[in-house]
Image (cartoon, helix red, strand yellow):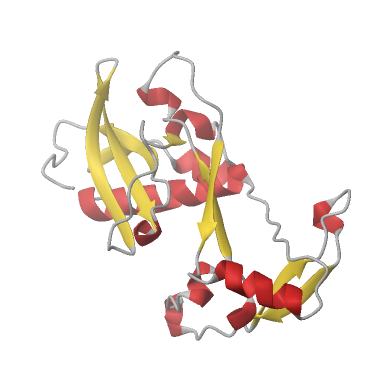
Amino acid sequence: MVRVQHQVPRKRRKKNTTTEFPILEAFGTEPRLAPQMMVPVADHPSFLFLPVLPPPRLLVGAVPLPDVGYWFRPVVDDAKARSDRLMASGKKGVKLYGEIKLGVFARMVAKIAHAYAVARLGLNGFRPLLVDEILVGKEPANLIGGPPNPVREARADSHLVEIEFVTFAAKEYVVVWIWLFAYLGTPIYGAVAGEALPHTDRTVR
């Protein structure tokens, strides 16, 4: 929804062709099975819904970690007005429903982090740790999470990615922080991309 409402270009120069998004008039007993009604993009009160992840277990040890939380906000300034107009047009309700598969989401974060670390440090510039997570989804909570304060004030940037070198339990790790849609004040995610080596370029960010 963010990509379409904010006209974010797609990769490979494909045009945004989505013209409608779904709403539900009622959740019922099982929201995922409730009948959907399509409304034009210009009328849809679109929201963005994201997980808030605790720090990667590898960086904090055995301390208790908070549960996964969730963050959401409208991605259009007139979301309430759009909902009101849909209700006035005869809709019995205007409800939005979505699901986040945390395993799939974690693998997306892992792919971004691994690719960025390789691009900045080189294939032999660190000992990678995310390959198993990317290929088979192995133990995501150990390597993927967020900073201690994952929700920050919005920035003007679309997306921000940077490397930080973090030492824990006598090991130095390459951590990649990822802030998608930073201008919306979204949560920040991080992944332990690998272990630093003696020749790793520690000036890279």
Tell me, yes or no, if residue 4 can be seen here. Answer: yes
The residue located at (36%, 35%) in the rendering is 149
Which residue, as the protein is rendered here, is positioned at the far left?
203
197 relative to 160 in the view: left or right:
left
Total number of numbered labels? 0
Residue 169's place in the image compared with 140, above or below, is above
32 relative to 70 in the view: left or right:
right
Residue 66 percent across, percent down from the top left: 51, 25
113 relative to 49 in the view: left or right:
left
Residue 169 percent across, percent down from the top left: 29, 15
Residue 120's place in the image compared with 158, above or below, is above
Residue 74's place in the image compared with 101, above or below, is below
Residue 102 percent across, percent down from the top left: 60, 43
The part of the image, by quadrant, that contains residue 95 is: bottom right
Tell me, yes or no, if residue 128 can be seen here. Answer: no
Which residue, as the protein is rendered here, is positioned at the far right?
29
The part of the image, by quadrant, that contains residue 82 is: bottom right
Residue 85 percent across, percent down from the top left: 67, 77
The residue located at (50%, 65%) in the rendering is 75
Is residue 74 or residue 167 the one in the foreground?
Answer: 74
The residue located at (22%, 34%) in the rendering is 165
Residue 176's place in the image compared with 65, above or below, is below
Is residue 1 or residue 161 the one in the foreground?
Answer: 1
Q: Quadrant of the N terminus?
A: bottom right
The residue located at (80%, 55%) in the rendering is 32
